[in-house]
């Protein structure tokens, strides 16, 4: 059953950040990220200020850096893209250690890296302090289209199951002497992936039947009502508000 | 005395072929009175699951009719269909197909919430259903953290919360360990509801149901007291049903109704 929980994003706790209702946190995160993205990239100090704000949030939520940093790796593809930019972009060039780099490219790379990392860290903090289920209810409250919430909810429920199925298939393969070593084995792995897809698809059909049998008509019922207190909204607004002050200052100085 | 209640289930001449042409049912007749516990026995491929999916109108389009407590299953009539799906509670073979929400509570609430139940009444239904299967203390846990036997019992609760007229269990003992099997039997015996137990686990049918029908080749071939059906060795052999090694149906007491 419950296979590896290595991907776990949630870190249970009881800090003021944990206690905030999920939809309030989502709105705060969105506000913060929008301000960060809108900040002119030349104002380097502003990004340091944003990073400091996130560090404060992490401290209040008691989420250690050792939890956040490994999870930042999801932005790796963007980092690769950012590293390429100074090499391929046009414009005035500078020589760094014998390599000719484009100046606008360097700025663009910095822009992607700084804003991307801040966004990812903020999202990790949201995930770390919010239970997946609470997040779904929060999205539902924010009137995110029901279909998207449902898809996310199924993912939360079945990711373990599919991972477990994948693990069993791998064990069964290896028990028969298979060892993925060279490219020739890609065919076997591709077939396994195909089998996994078909099995998941069929499970999807069975789940749908079971849902229909319990009166499903196309929309998951909203199971929780209720609203956040204005105190919660005020507390959550601290982060985007502080970011807004910094961002506005950066624009004025520009 | 008032008029006796309509039978829980009346199936008449039900025939069905899948869209790919494979015929699964060739005219099934079955009548189940209120409060009866009936085992539907049959080998793999006999059409058991196809029959089950007709009972609440998931499958339709063939010949014949299905009536649930006097209400005919008509797949076109959405309101009637919703009522049918309330009356017929199906517990599917794999609890992971049935439990798809992040917590047990949400899953048990799903059915009644689809029926429009909300608030205090919804909480009451969830609590009662979970207590009926002895799972009252797991409401806030995610289903995938429960043992298989526990998930099966929660799956029963998801259906009980809809307060069904007929409880239909599709292979309820598959993959259960002996203790899980016994616990499920205790739970099921404590329920006051008409029950259709679809299985090829013959001792379980003996333990749970006073009456058995054998479905084979898409028709009901035998209908009688479970003890008698299981003692008919020729009949069992003819329909690929087998008692486990060493099991003698004459050596165990027959269950009686009520």
Image (cartoon, rainbow, N blue to C red):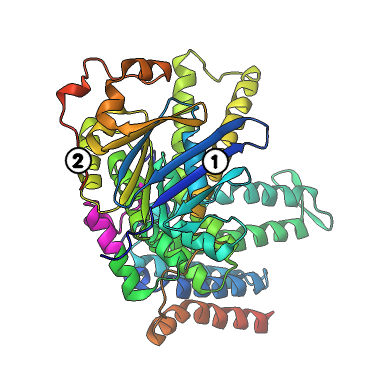
**Residue at image coords 60%, 60%:** A116
Indicate which disc residue B179 carries: none
Give the CA separation, mark 1 to mark 2.
29 Å
Along the line of sight, the residue nearer the viewer: A12 or A137: A137
**Residue B138 in magenta?**
yes
Residue B8 appears in view: yes
Q: Residues within 10 Å of mark 2 (few under 14, many from 20)?
A: few
Which region of the structure is painted magenta? B126-143
- Residue identified by numbered label 2: B256
- Residue identified by numbered label 1: B14
**Residue B240 in magenta?**
no
Res A34 → quadrant = bottom right
SS type, badge 1:
strand
**Residue at image coords 56%, 71%:** A30
Question: Are dots 1 and 2 in contact, CB under 8 Å?
Answer: no
Residue A7 appears in view: no
Q: Which percent across, then down, holds residue B183?
A: 21, 41
Name the chain letter of the residue that bears numbered label 1.
B
């Amino acid at each position: 059953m419950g296979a590896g929980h290595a991907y776990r994003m949630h870190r249970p706790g009881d800090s003021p950040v944990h206690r905030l209702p999920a939809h309030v946190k989502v709105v705060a995160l969105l506000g913060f990220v929008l301000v960060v993205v809108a900040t002119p990239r030349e104002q380097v100090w502003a990004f340091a200020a944003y990073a400091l704000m996130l560090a404060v949030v992490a401290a209040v939520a008691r989420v250690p850096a050792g939890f956040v940093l490994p999870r930042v790796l999801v932005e790796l593809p963007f980092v690769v893209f950012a590293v390429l930019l100074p090499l391929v972009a046009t414009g005035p060039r500078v020589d760094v250690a014998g390599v000719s780099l484009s100046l606008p490219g360097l700025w663009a790379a910095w822009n992607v890296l700084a804003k991307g990392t801040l966004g990812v860290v903020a999202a990790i903090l949201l995930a770390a302090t919010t239970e997946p289920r609470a997040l779904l209810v929060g999205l539902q409250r924010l009137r995110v289209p029901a279909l998207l919430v449902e898809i996310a909810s199924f993912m939360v429920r079945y990711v373990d199951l599919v991972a477990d199925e994948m693990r069993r298939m791998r064990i069964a393969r290896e028990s028969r002497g298979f060892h993925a070593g060279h490219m020739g084995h890609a065919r076997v792995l591709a077939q396994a992936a195909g089998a996994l897809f078909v099995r998941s698809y069929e499970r999807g059909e069975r789940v749908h039947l079971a849902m229909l049998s319990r009166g499903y008509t196309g929309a998951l019922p909203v199971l929780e009502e209720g609203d956040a207190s204005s105190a919660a909204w005020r507390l959550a607004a601290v982060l985007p508000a502080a970011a807004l002050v910094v961002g506005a200052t950066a624009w004025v100085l520009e | 005395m008032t008029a006796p209640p309509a039978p829980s289930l009346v199936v008449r001449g039900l025939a069905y072929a899948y869209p790919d042409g494979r015929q699964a049912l060739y005219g099934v007749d079955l009548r189940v009175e209120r409060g009866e516990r009936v085992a539907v026995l049959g080998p793999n491929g006999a059409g058991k699951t196809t029959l089950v999916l007709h009972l609440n109108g998931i499958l339709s389009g063939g010949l014949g009719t299905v009536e649930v407590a006097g209400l005919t299953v008509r797949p076109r009539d959405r309101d009637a269909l919703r009522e049918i799906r309330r009356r017929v509670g199906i517990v599917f073979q794999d609890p992971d197909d049935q439990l798809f929400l992040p917590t047990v509570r949400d899953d048990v609430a799903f059915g009644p919430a689809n029926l429009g139940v909300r608030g205090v009444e919804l909480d009451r239904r969830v609590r009662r259903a979970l207590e009926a299967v002895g799972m009252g203390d797991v409401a806030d846990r995610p289903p995938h953290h429960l043992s298989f036997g526990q998930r099966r019992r929660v799956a029963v609760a998801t259906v009980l919360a809809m307060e069904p007229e007929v409880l239909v269990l599709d292979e309820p003992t598959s993959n259960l360990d002996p203790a899980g099997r016994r616990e499920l039997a205790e739970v099921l015996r404590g329920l006051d509801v008409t029950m259709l137990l679809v299985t090829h686990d013959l001792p379980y049918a003996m333990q749970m149901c006073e009456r058995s029908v054998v479905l084979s080749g898409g028709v009901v071939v035998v209908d009688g007291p479970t003890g008698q059906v299981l003692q008919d060795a020729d009949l069992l052999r003819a329909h690929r049903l087998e008692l486990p090694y060493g099991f003698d149906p004459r050596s165990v007491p027959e269950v009686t109704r009520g």
